[in-house]
Amino acid sequence: MTSERSVATTTAPVNPRTGRPAGWAQASVLLVAACLPVLGAVLLAPGLPSMTRAFADTAGASVLVPLVLTAPALLIGLTAPFAGRVADRVGRTGLLTVALLLYAIVGTAPLYLPSLTLILASRVLVGLAEAAIMTCCTALLADYFHGPARQRMLGLQGVVMSVAAIVFVAVAGALIATGWQTPFWLYLVSIPLALLAPLVLWRPVAGEHVEQLPALPWRSFVRPVGVTLVGGVLFYVAVVELSYRLDELGVTSASSIGLISALLSLSSALVSWSFGRLSRLGSRVVVPAAFALLGVAYVGIGLAPSAPIVVVFTLVAGLGSGLLLPSLLSWTLTGLSYAQRGRGTGFWVAALFLGEFICPLAILALNAALGGLGMAICAAGVLSLAVAALARRLTKVTAGR
């Protein structure tokens, strides 16, 4: 397998129309488009109670309405590898443009669909679009940028997603006041991106139509993807459970919980911004460090006797989560060629979003088994510390191949 050092020295492709390599125009389109799955994850959550009341006459509404929020994540997890295969075979840019258009069409469908069942069906299609968008954007960033520039872009992707989560939560809170359907208008944001993509992006020189795709290096590739699946579960523990833990400790104000959650995103963005420099330490350092930070944070949050202590460990959790995703993605992409990178990214995206889907179910099971949310979060921290030790070994094996 190609070493991290050799990949870092690969020459970046140039735009055949201009003869110049990718710059901020390409990066901006890809980074913003990669935030669209975050939009669906956080935009609708505040409106679920209103939506449940709106469909009170529908049988099973209490079960179906939460699926409106979670179904896209499950579909991303199930379909991203197929999106990656299409991206490797026919190219990323065309698939990305189609997915951006589909995202706008099916994302706004709840504005006019008459039944909860049809709305849920539209959310399945949103998941398909998001799988293609996330896979293509991440793969193109890796295609266009190499070495330190690639590491900076992977870090910036984490920054933009963290900041977008804060902005989307604030916007959602304001829009929900006018009705549960209003936030769905924001899915139209993908239209200008769909118009820009064919103008700004191009197919890398190595990305001509591929008849026979080279196999993925499964013996080494399965390690980062497997760790990413566990990492996806652990990454979302704070995102999903922090508000409930604060409520247990007496913090019931929505504004206070929102502020503390924003601190999580801000500290995450800070570390992601620095990933270009931190990545020089190599996967064998940054991947275990990310899990170790999350482990310490979750043990602290789970055992904390008061809200101020939770706030301190929330900042630590943000540091870990900000380091986790770019370090896992960088490790996953190590040594993959252009014709493998779409599928490689697809499997990574699938593992991450399946982890997101599994997370609340896992915490619920731990809560029941251990007798409380605090102990469940603490158990997640112990697991994260164990994964840190395991990742230290696995990254050593990969780097040595």
Image (cartoon, rainbow, N blue to C red):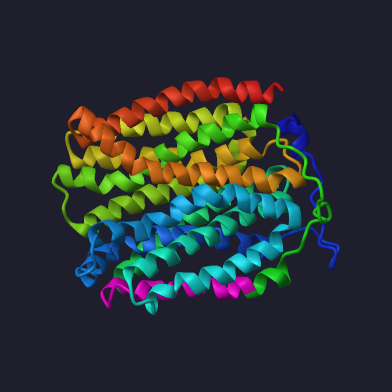
Considering every residue shown, the one lying at the far left of the view is 250
**Left or right: where 380 falls relative to 320:** left
Judge left or right: residue 128 versus residue 364.
right
Residue range (magenta): 175-194
Count of numbered badges drawn on the protein: 0
Residue at position x 81%, y 51% from top? 210
Magenta span contains residue 179: yes
In the image, is residue 302 part of the stretch drawn in magenta? Answer: no
Foreground residue among 347 and 247: 347
Residue 1 in picture, x, y percent from top left: 74, 29
Regarding residue 319, the answer to whether it shows in the image is: no
Q: Could you tell me which quadrant the C terminus lies in? A: top right
Residue at point 49% right, 58% down? 127
The answer to which quarter of the image holds residue 97 is bottom right
| Looking at the image, residue 192 lies above or below residue 260 | below
Residue 208 occupies which quadrant of the picture?
Answer: bottom right
The dominant secondary structure in magenta is helix
Q: Nearer the viewer, residue 167 or 339?
A: 339
From the top left corner, tell me how far across and down residue 115 is, in percent: 33, 73
Q: Is residue 215 above or below residue 219?
A: below
